[in-house]
Image (spheres, rainbow, N blue to C red):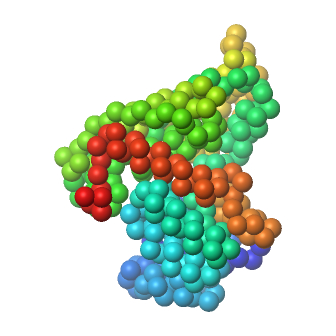
Amino acid sequence: MTGLRWGILATGGIAHAFTSDLRTAGLDVAAVGSRSTASAQAFADEFGIPRAHGSYADLIADPEVDILYIATPHSHHLEPAVAALEAGKHVLIEKPVTLDADEAAAIRDVAAGRGLLAMEAMWTRYLPHMIRIRELVRSGALGEVRALAADHTQQISADPAHRLNALELGGGALLDLGIYPVSFAWDILGAPVEVRALGRLGETGADTEVSIALTHASGAVSSLLTSSRAAGPNTAHLIGTEARIEIDSVWYTPTSFRLIAPDGTVREEYRSEVDGRGMQYQALAAEQIIADGRTDSDLLTFEQSVLIMGTLDEVRAQVGVTYPKER
């Protein structure tokens, strides 16, 4: 551990999960900020955090905080992330990093100008089973990887007031759920050279289902699916000429996978043994990056986060999802 002091900006469900995992890892959570003092204090009491701030601005100004976890809805990431960077604080920003690529680029530029870490909290990339999968792919254990398939599908409320259905909050299955398989495809196969998408919109205009086909520079293809109205298997597959990998449900959380030969022989079976949800690994990575004097993650550079948002922008355009700020 590096002694960095974390501040938690916002107190919703994802902030609870992240902070619980920080505590599991023994990291220092120094302060929390919310839009109300009552919410911040309740969160602080729950996790034993010494300072609670009744505004985001007060948290950002706290001299006892070194790095902020931005846990607001992604429609509201840009302003606090930029403010934190301008105040001299590193930022770990919940996925998706912003609403669109332009906003992500703005954060990138401020972080670069300040010499600080800005990192997307795509926690899946830092999980032990994903580290091992990446090793297998790069070692050639699968031969040529020709195809990838993954879904992230959940049955979430159809209430128009729900966050995932509210366009003003960046609602829709794509940005909240679909970013997982899209980021996975980028991770394993690199940038897409062609993007095709079909989707279905709900009554608010937010996407409820999106099917995405990507072609990558190698010629490999990705088939990705997301839904906020129906739960699917939530599995993932990598198909190579020498072997395939089958990742069990829920593939983007700590789980198991198998490396399987074309004849069906299981060459390797991996079972995750992780305390908590596994969100601590990204925090540990962020702390190590800062301790090393670096300002970017090797597993997910901020430039790649910007480019992934560009892919999501293109998917949204093809599906027909428009946010209020774009009208």
Q: Determine whether, in the image, residue 157 is placed left or right of residue 46.
A: left
In the figure, 273 relative to 45: above or below?
A: above
Q: Nearer the viewer, residue 286 or 129?
A: 286
* Residue at the limit of the structure toward the left, as seen here: 203
- Quarter assignment of residue 261: top right
Quadrant where the C terminus lies? Answer: bottom left
Can you give x and y, in whole percent of width and height, for residue 167 in the image? 28, 56
Residue 249 visible, this orientation = no
Residue at image point 44% right, 46% down: 312
- What residue appears at the point 57 percent right and 68 percent down from the top-left corner? 109
Apparent side of residue 170 relative to residue 267 in the rendered image (left or right): left
Give residue 25's position: percent from left, percent from top. 69, 64
For the question of whether residue 253 can be seen, the reply is: yes
Position of 220 with respect to 103 (left or right) is: right
> Residue at horizontal 64%, vertical 53%?
300
Residue 156, position as x, y percentages in the image: 33, 47
Quarter of the figure with the N terminus = bottom right
Front-most of 303 and 62?
Answer: 303
How many badges with numbers are in the image?
Answer: 0
Residue 54: x %, y % from top left: 42, 86
Q: Is residue 40 above or below residue 223?
A: below
Residue that appears at 66% across and 25% down: 145
